[in-house]
Image: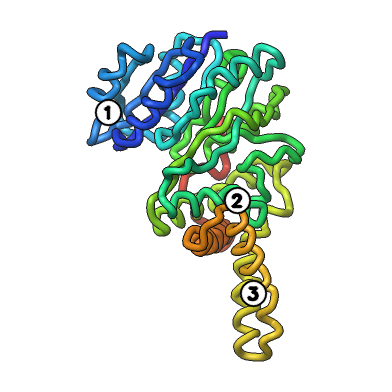
Amino acid sequence: MQFSIIVPVYNRPDEMKELLDSLAAQTYKEFELVVVEDGSSIKSEELCKSYSNQINISYYYKENQGPSIGRNYGLAKAKGNYYLFFDSDCILPAHYMETIHKELSENFVDCYGGPDGAMDDFSDFQKAVSYAMTSFFTTGGIRGGKKQVHKFHPRSFNLGFSKAVYENTGGFPVTTMHPGEDMVFAIEVIKRGFETRLVSDAYVFHKRRISFKKFYKQVFGFGKTRYIISKHYPETFKIFFLFPSLFVLGTIGSLLLGVGVHRVFAFPALLYTFLVFADALTKTKSLKISVKALAASYVQLFAYGIGFMDAVWKHKVLGKDEFGVFGKGFY
């Protein structure tokens, strides 16, 4: 195997430095790195050049067209036959490349994904968001490394696939829809008969968003595109996709009835709050982080649920097609 790591970047040289540091520290160093600057006004070119004596690195600048098209640009430039993708705000543990080389050498799979988490030196907010995105009480624990899923759908923050997958699919869908383009890619990979796998030991540290406002906007997009994808691939729809929207309506209804009718109606919302807080406190061992994790969990569920309902409303009631994707395929 010849590994090519492809990273699209947009105005994030500070985050790129941390990613580059982690790549330079890998115990297995047989890989190339392809950095695709997606029309940034704050470029990472000089930063990338400064690592040329530590990493086999290539840097390319292109007009801004979004991460999906940026990844495909990197694929066209890559020289390897197994392609790995990370977000620019990820940090790899030193064993990552060695772990994935061993995994694929001993038990090859055409497409894999790994989980993400938080480093000890991440901010309290980043740790809280990491909890919200990986907890059983919010996402079912799938993003945190849970294996009990029928078909694993890797995400582009930590993803790898073979040249065979690339030649069959042509890479990522050519769409301005973001986030969600990696979900479409994973669906297509599985539909075309390729095996996918979660490699739990191939984890990354993900810095994520730096404010609740940005976090809300990101997860709102997840909910919105989930509906769009379900319309194109109805066979992928699962009933639990509706849970965040039902959670929003149920929580609001519970609290309103608790205030207006009888406090017993508020019990479900209060019980969920207690369970999340207790679980976060157990995992983080910090009262401060647990409070923020509770807030992040509510933001995560409300943003996803409202995003899903917003997409349904705009499509079914208003007849809008925000991304120009209804009525045509992604590939």
Separation of residues labelled 1 and 2 (CA atoms): 35 Å
Mark 3 vs mark 2, foreground winner is 3
Which labelled disc corresponds to residue 70? none
Out of 244 and 206, give the one closest to the viewer: 206
- What is the quadrant of residue 213 in the picture? bottom left
Mark 1 vs mark 2, foreground winner is 1
Element carrying mark 3: helix
Total of numbered circles in the picture?
A: 3
User: What's the amino acid at mark 3?
Assistant: Leu
Q: CB of mark 3 within 8 Å of CB of mark 2?
A: no
Q: Position of residue 193 (x, y in %)?
A: 72, 23
Element carrying mark 1: loop
Considering only order in the chain, which callout, 2 or 3, is on the residue closer to the N terminus? 2
Note whether residue 313 is visible: no
Q: Position of residue 216 (x, y in %)?
A: 46, 57
| Residue at mark 2 | 227
| Residue at mark 1 | 44
User: What's the amino acid at mark 1?
Assistant: Ser
| Residue at mark 3 | 270
